[in-house]
């Protein structure tokens, strides 16, 4: 396939844009304000809430009778922190849990709802938890009404994942009816009203199953394409915007799943692509070394940076395969699970399955991933970090009355200025850092993660830029664990009228926030000097930087 120079610069990984010798003294950034790639939708900064470990019970939901401050059962401190990030989207109720969940269990008076064995009840550290614990026996007190309450409190758009493995298609039809039918129009609309919500929820985003190649049914792509068509042949449609349906896409670099699913859809009828809004792709860049979130070497830090940077390959190659069949480009990419997955040896409570204390290393993973989404604003329509509270690449740690934000949270707060901005072609030129190849960590939780990354270098600088009027937002990270990086940014053809800098960094990339030290890692002002069309600054070791530039 032939690429023009412009096409290459728009699509090539940041680590490949004009790489320089490791002996280079500085990095350069060139921002082109007239060359738009696409608009960065707020939903690419989306979130994910699954009934898993401490995400819902002890995280989002503390209960209406709890002594922990709450809004009708939703943790108040979480709501306040989420409002700082701006409106986005939240995926629920899973994850693998979704394909074992019956939405009808989670409606009506909470004292009448059944308790069900959670999908994750016998996994990992939950094996040592009492069987009556809500992480193992889900009380269903957090259901459709409660999730919608949470979304409204934080001004988020809901993204529901429907059960394809263990419920019939009629259950999806009825859930859509319950959520979206006009007031008083159907029996389920009346039931919704009796539960306190006469007006429809107007849920637009619906995932049709989850990881159908694995926990969602162990299907082949050919088998799943049949199930997807069957589940979506007819669904209720009401006044307002059309439903946006999202099939379960591949596990990381499984190109075969994308090729065969799209091939089957095209063979049946190319018009069926009108029934698909987004293609759900999952990528966990995994742990490295021993998998511990706090105890890692600088080489292991750099190995994880390289693994995170493979998000570029994930997006571009799946996009290419999708286009072989969806030639009109009707379907966008939805990265609805992503993050760095460590062992739960540092979890802050015994039932926080897959939970860990986050560090600056995780913040840089978030920076690399989110900047990649921005650079591909023409391809990526939504992304959902896994998960919101107490799990994997979490934004928050919470247990009982204790609560704190993680370094990853601060990246989301810094990056919200990109929302609805025009993504711009930007050149990043930087030296590389080298490291030994990374073996996969021991332990079954890493067995299904991406193959060991053969790459042994990563660029020290990667980022993105957006424009709103005469204001530019430029974000990037210095991936090197111990070395500061001088940076010269140029806006060719424009005078820089002013610049403000903000940086997230700490003394070590192993540093993070805890209940005892909740502000150990937080953003601070960064000095940046403007002269003509140039901005000069020094990016601290292991840092995430945001520049706000007026031109």
Image: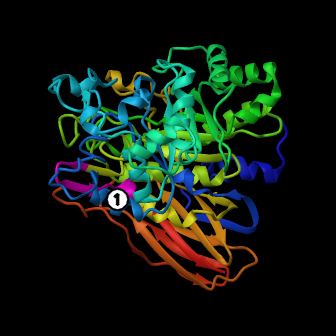
Q: Is residue 513 visible?
A: no
- Residue 400, magenta (yes or no): yes
At 32% across and 33% down in the image, what residue appears?
Answer: 52
How many marks overall?
1
Nearer to me, 171 or 160: 171
List the residue tagged with mark 1: 79
Image position of 484 with respect to 452: above or below: below
Residue 418, position as x, y percentages in the image: 57, 64
Q: Position of residue 363 (x, y in %)?
A: 40, 53
Question: What quarter of the picture does the C terminus occupy?
Answer: bottom right
Q: Which residues are magenta?
A: 398-409
The image quarter containing residue 319 is top right
Q: Say which of 406 and 305 sits in front.
A: 406
Is residue 264 located in the magenta-colored stretch of the structure? no
Colouring scheme applied when the structure was drawn = rainbow
Q: Element at badge 1?
A: helix
Q: Few, some or many C-alpha atoms within 10 Å of disc 1 (few <14, some 14-19, many ≥20)?
A: some
Q: Is residue 61 left or right of residue 32?
A: left
Q: Nearer the viewer, residue 22 or 455?
A: 455
Front residue of 485 and 130: 130
Q: How far across and down, in percent of the image, does residue 348 sit?
A: 20, 43
Q: Is residue 431 shown left or right of residue 18?
A: left
Tell me the residue at 65%/20% (across/down): 230
Residue 324 lies, with reference to residue 201, above or below; the image says: above
Quarter where residue 55 is shown:
top left
- Indicate the quadrant where residue 249 lies: top right
Residue at 48 percent of width and 27 percent of height? 452
Which residue occupies 55% across, 80% down?
499
Say if residue 365 shows up in the picture. yes
Measured as percent of width and height from the top left, residue 37 is found at: 73, 57
Q: Is residue 360 left or right of residue 32?
A: left
């Amino acid at each position: 396939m032939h690429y023009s120079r412009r096409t290459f610069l728009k699509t090539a990984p940041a680590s490949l844009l004009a790489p320089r010798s490791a002996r280079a003294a500085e990095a350069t950034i060139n921002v082109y304000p007239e060359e738009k790639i696409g608009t960065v939708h707020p939903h690419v900064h989306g979130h994910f809430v699954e009934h898993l470990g401490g995400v819902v019970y002890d995280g989002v939901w503390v209960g209406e009778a709890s002594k922990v401050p709450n809004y009708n059962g939703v943790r108040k401190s979480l709501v306040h922190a989420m409002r700082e990030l701006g409106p986005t989207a939240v995926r629920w109720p899973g994850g693998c849990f979704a394909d074992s969940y019956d939405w009808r269990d989670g409606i009506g008076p909470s004292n009448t709802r059944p308790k069900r064995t959670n999908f994750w009840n016998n996994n990992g550290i939950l094996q040592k938890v009492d069987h009556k614990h809500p992480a193992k026996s889900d009380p269903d007190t957090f259901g459709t009404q409660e999730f919608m309450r949470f979304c409204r409190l934080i001004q988020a758009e809901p993204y529901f994942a429907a059960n394809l493995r263990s419920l019939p298609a009629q259950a999806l039809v009825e859930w859509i009816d319950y959520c979206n039918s006009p007031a008083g129009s159907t029996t389920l609309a009346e039931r919704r009203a009796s539960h306190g919500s006469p007006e429809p929820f107007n849920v637009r985003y619906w995932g049709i199953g989850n990881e159908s190649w694995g926990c969602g049914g162990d299907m082949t792509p050919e088998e799943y394409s049949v199930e997807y068509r069957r589940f979506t042949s007819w669904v209720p449609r009401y006044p307002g915007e059309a439903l946006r349906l999202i099939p379960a896409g591949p596990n990381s670099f499984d190109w075969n799943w994308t090729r065969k699913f799209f091939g089957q859809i095209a063979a049946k009828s190319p018009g069926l692509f009108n029934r698909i809004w987004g293609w759900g792709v999952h990528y966990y860049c995994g742990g490295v070394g021993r998998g511990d979130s706090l105890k890692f070497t600088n080489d292991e830090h750099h190995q994880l940076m390289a693994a995170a940077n493979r998000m570029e390959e994930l997006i571009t190659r799946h996009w290419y395969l999708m286009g072989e069949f969806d030639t009109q480009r009707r379907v966008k990419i939805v990265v609805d699970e992503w993050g760095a997955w460590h062992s739960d040896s540092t979890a802050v409570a015994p039932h926080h399955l897959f939970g860990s204390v986050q560090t600056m290393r995780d913040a840089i993973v978030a920076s690399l991933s989110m900047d990649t989404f921005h650079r591909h604003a023409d391809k990526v329509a939504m992304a959902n970090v896994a998960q919101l509270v107490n799990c994997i690449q979490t934004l928050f740690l919470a247990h009982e009355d204790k609560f704190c934000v993680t370094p990853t949270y601060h990246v989301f707060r810094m990056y919200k200025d990109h929302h609805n901005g025009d993504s711009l072609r930007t050149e990043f030129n930087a030296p590389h850092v080298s490291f030994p190849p990374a073996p996969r960590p021991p332990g079954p939780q890493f067995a299904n993660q991406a193959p060991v990354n053969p790459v042994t270098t990563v660029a020290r600088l990667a980022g993105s830029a957006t424009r709103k009027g005469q204001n530019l937002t430029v974000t990037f990270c210095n991936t090197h664990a111990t070395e500061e990086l001088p940076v010269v940014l140029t806006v060719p053809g424009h005078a820089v009228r002013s610049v403000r800098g903000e940086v997230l960094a700490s003394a070590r990339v192993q540093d993070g926030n805890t209940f005892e030290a909740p502000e150990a890692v937080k953003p601070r002002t960064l000095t940046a000097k403007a002269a003509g069309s140039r901005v000069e600054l020094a990016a601290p070791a292991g840092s995430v930087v945001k520049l706000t530039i007026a031109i």
